[in-house]
Amino acid sequence: MTNSHRDFNKVSKGQAPAPFSLRLTFEERAKLEAAANGVPLGAYIKAMLFDGDLAKVRRRNTNPVEDHQALARVLSALGRSRLSSNLNQLARAVNT
C-alpha cells in the first residue's frame, strides 16, 4: 500500500463514509423495484444484504392532484393576497 491509498474502513471525526454506487441495467432495476414492492430501493437492498427486517416506511401522499386548474387558481389567489409577506412580518415581530 502507498501513502496515498485511502483506508475506506476508517472514517474521520465528523465525516460520513462516501456513498456506494451501483449501476444496473433497465431490466435489473425493474426486477429490483418489483421485488421491493414500493419500499425505497436503498432500504430494500440493505435489508436483503444484512438480513434485516424492513421497517415500515412513512410516505407522503403520492396521489396526483385531480383538478390542476383549481389548484392553480388557489395558488394564484394565495400569491395575490400578500399573505406570505404578512406572515413574514408576524414572524419577524415575534423574534424581536
Image (tube, rainbow, N blue to C red):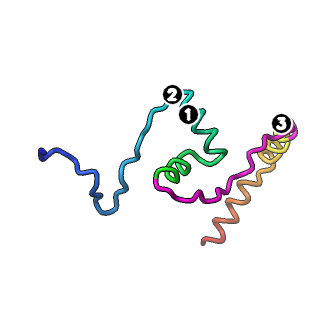
Dot 3 or dot 1: first in sequence order is 1
Mark 1 neighbour density, 10 Å: few (under 14) some (14–19) many (20 or more): few
Q: Give the amino acid at mark 3.
A: His
Q: Give the amino acid at mark 2.
A: Thr
Residue located at (62% from left, 48% from top): 39
Residue located at (36% from left, 48% from top): 18
Whole-number angstrom distance, CA of label 3 to CA of label 1: 32 Å
Residue range of the region highlighted in magenta in the rendering: 50-70
**Local SS, label 2:** loop
* Viewer-nearest residue: 2 or 49: 49
* SS assignment for the magenta stretch, majority: loop
Q: Magenta includes 92?
A: no
User: Which residue is labeled 1 in the image?
Assistant: 29
**Local SS, label 1:** helix
Q: Magenta includes 64?
A: yes
Mark 3 neighbour density, 10 Å: few (under 14) some (14–19) many (20 or more): few
Count of residue discs: 3
Residue located at (60% from left, 72% from top): 96
State whether residue 85 is above or below residue 66. Answer: below
Measured as percent of width and height from the top left, residue 93 is found at: 66, 69
Which label number is shown at residue 25?
2
Where does the N terminus fall, quadrant-wise? top left
State whether residue 91 is above or below residue 75. Answer: below
